[in-house]
Image (cartoon, rainbow, N blue to C red):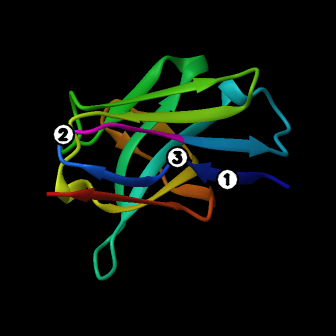
Amino acid sequence: EVQLVESGGGLVQTGGSLRLSCAASGFTFAFDDYAIGWFRQAPGKEREGVSCINNSKGKTHYADSVKGRFTISSDNAKKTLYLQMNSLKPEDTDVYYCAILRWCAPHGLGPALNWGPGTQVTVSS
């Protein structure tokens, strides 16, 4: 059974940085073969796809709202997904979830197949 656990969230001031991690386990194939990504959601808002990566296919995607500020990466040996978030803004305040995806392409994220429980990111103004 695939399990995902996010960490690294917290409270940061506008302009600050955080790095989220997502530790994964239970994979059948190599971690790099999977499309994995980050979503975020605040209460009363729709869940937004933030970024995704598929290392074996050389694919990444970033939502327009985070391009140039966030960087996604993964470590195949550690089976861990990362999201480096710089120049944070109050509108980045959300619960961030990592997910295994059906696909990842430069134009967007595919449907999520498995979710982690999420980690709260709060950016103060």
Q: Say whether residue 52 is left or right of residue 62.
A: right
Residue 73 in picture, x, y percent from top left: 50, 25
Q: Say whether residue 89 is left or right of residue 17.
A: left
Residue 89 in picture, x, y percent from top left: 18, 49
Number of residues whose C-alpha sits closer than 10 Å to that of mark 3, classed few (under 14), some (14–19) or many (20 or more) = some
> At label 3, which amino acid type do we have?
Gly
Q: CA distance from mark 3 to mark 2?
A: 17 Å
Nearer mark to the viewer, of 1 and 2: 2
The residue singled out by tag 1 in the image is: 5
33 in relation to 96, above or below: above
Of residues 30 and 16, the one drawn nearer to the viewer in this rendering: 16
Q: CA distance from mark 1 to mark 2?
A: 26 Å
Residue 101 visible? The answer is no
The residue singled out by tag 3 in the image is: 8
Q: Which mark is residue 33?
A: none
Q: Secondary structure at mark 1?
A: strand
Contact between marks 3 and 2 (CB within 8 A): the answer is: no
Which span of residues is magenta-colored?
Answer: 16-20
Q: CA distance from mark 3 to mark 1?
A: 10 Å
The residue singled out by tag 2 in the image is: 15
Number of residues whose C-alpha sits closer than 10 Å to that of mark 1, classed few (under 14), some (14–19) or many (20 or more) = some
Q: Secondary structure at mark 3?
A: loop
